[in-house]
Image (tube, helix red, strand yellow):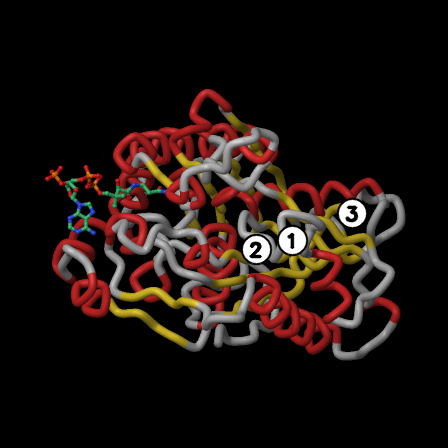
């Protein structure tokens, strides 16, 4: 950072991790009352990945973290004090345990013992919230270099008999490294818009497992352990909230929607992405889409889409990029940056 300039958080590494097992639509159709055709036409998803028995969210978070730390080291060209991460923020709604947070265990397994580490729970908006939190800590001088991970394993909380949620959700993790830098640099995060509306709390929920039910004498019914979603209402809210949040941020930073090169929106449903592009007056080819390959990976969604798009050249250095997410809570959030040329470890 040049002396005398304002401090910014700058993206300098990117990577992702997926479980070994891919589940194509045909496998769900063999098990549930659904078809490949319904899933493809209603959601755009062809397959998703699921963890193996015994695996957990931290395993994917560590794999993504390893790749992104490696990419940041390669970009910096050396393993010096300048590449030392002093903050780990993990966005997840499927932590390894209800208590404690998963981030400290992830940090330890990455050899980052002693650094600040905590979880953020904003469901599918979790990565944008985590990015904003880490960026704010960097600009405030509380941290110098942050590992920001979005990781979820919704296969562990889905009702095996629910064809709708089984069709959409997949497991995965994506991560970025942020460093202190200059707002004029490519990769500098230029602004955020974050919001919530607790009135929609019940549209996306796992009723049991938290203090509300655990503090009662009667054990909750088994179905309350599973994730539930009111799909149609969530669909409408997702389009409205991501479009509004994106427009709010664009106005704040002085960008016009038409100038955006790429929009990386939460990968929930291709019809939602198209509607958001339409609201922003953008042609569909500005959308980054990888949900066909990975499904909706919740907090992993945006960083995994970034990693895929960076690896295949869809994101080019200098591109004006807008990230926007929506999820349970309800929550929403957007971020903007000019795309840098970070070394990207391919998603594996
Ligand atoms: O990640 C953040 C939050 N999540 C989202 O953003 C997801 C938002 N919601 C959606 O993507 C869509 O609402 C879904 C993909 C979940 C559902 O698609 P939809 O077009 O909104 O369907 P629907 O819920 O209105 O249901 C239409 C029909 C129903 O049958 P009936 O009542 O018309 O007979 C469903 O039972 O489609 C049926 N259906 C299915 N049929 C075959 C629902 N899931 C399936 C399925 N296969 N997998």
Q: The N terminus is located in which quarter?
A: bottom right
CB under 8 Å between callouts 2 and 1? yes
In the picture shown, does residue 25 fall above or below 249? below
Among the 4 quarters of the image, the one containing residue 228: top left
Please give left or right for residue 331 compared with residue 72 in the image. Answer: left
Q: How many residues crowd mark 1 within 10 Å: few (<14), some (14–19), many (20+)?
A: many
Q: Position of residue 345 (x, y in %)?
A: 56, 75
Q: Which residue is mark 1?
A: 90
Q: Image point 79% across, 72% down: which residue?
A: 111
- Residue at mark 2 to residue at mark 3: CA–CA distance: 18 Å
Q: Is 284 in front, or is 32?
A: 32
Q: Earlier in the sequence, mark 2 or mark 1?
A: 1
Q: Image point 50% across, 65% down: which residue?
A: 307
Q: Earlier in the sequence, mark 2 or mark 3?
A: 3
Q: Position of residue 279 (x, y in %)?
A: 31, 33
Q: Which residue is mark 3?
A: 138
- Residue at mark 2 to residue at mark 1: CA–CA distance: 6 Å
Query: Is the CB atom of the residue marked by disc 3 within 8 angstroms of ligand 1's nearest atom?
Result: no
Ligand 1's image quarter is top left
Q: Which residue is mark 2?
A: 150
- Residue at mark 1 to residue at mark 3: CA–CA distance: 16 Å
């Amino acid at each position: 950072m040049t002396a005398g300039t304002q401090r910014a958080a700058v993206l300098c590494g990117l990577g992702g991790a997926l479980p070994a097992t891919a589940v194509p639509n045909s496998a769900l159709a063999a098990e549930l009352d659904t078809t490949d055709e319904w899933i493809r036409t209603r959601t755009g998803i062809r397959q998703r990945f699921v963890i193996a028995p015994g695996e957990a969210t931290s395993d994917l978070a560590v794999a993504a973290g390893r790749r992104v730390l490696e990419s940041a080291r390669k970009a910096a060209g050396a393993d010096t004090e300048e590449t030392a991460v002093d903050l780990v923020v993990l966005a997840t709604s499927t932590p390894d345990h209800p208590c404690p947070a998963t981030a400290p265990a992830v940090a330890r397994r990455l050899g980052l013992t002693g650094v600040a580490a905590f979880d953020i729970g904003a469901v599918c908006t979790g990565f944008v919230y985590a990015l904003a939190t880490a960026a704010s800590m960097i600009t405030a001088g509380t941290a110098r270099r942050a590992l920001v991970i979005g990781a979820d394993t919704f296969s562990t909380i889905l009702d095996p008999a629910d064809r709708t949620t089984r069709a959409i959700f997949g497991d995965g993790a994506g991560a970025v490294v942020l460093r202190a830098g200059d707002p004029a640099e490519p990769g500098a995060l230029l602004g955020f818009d974050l919001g919530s509306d607790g009135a929609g709390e019940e549209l996306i929920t796992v009723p049991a497992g938290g203090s509300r039910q655990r503090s009662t004498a009667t054990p909750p019914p088994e179905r309350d352990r599973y994730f539930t979603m009111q799909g149609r209402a969530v669909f409408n809210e997702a389009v409205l909230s991501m479009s509004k949040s994106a427009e709010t941020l664009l106005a704040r930073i002085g960008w016009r929607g038409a100038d955006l090169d790429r929009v990386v929106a939460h990968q929930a449903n291709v019809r939602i992405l198209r509607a958001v592009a339409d609201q922003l007056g953008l042609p569909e080819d500005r959308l980054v889409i990888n949900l066909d390959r990975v499904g909706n990976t919740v907090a992993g969604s945006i960083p995994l889409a970034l990693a895929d798009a960076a690896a295949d050249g869809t994101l080019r250095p200098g591109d004006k990029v807008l990230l926007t997410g929506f999820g349970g809570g309800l929550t929403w959030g957007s971020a903007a940056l000019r795309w840098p040329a970070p070394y990207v470890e391919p998603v594996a």
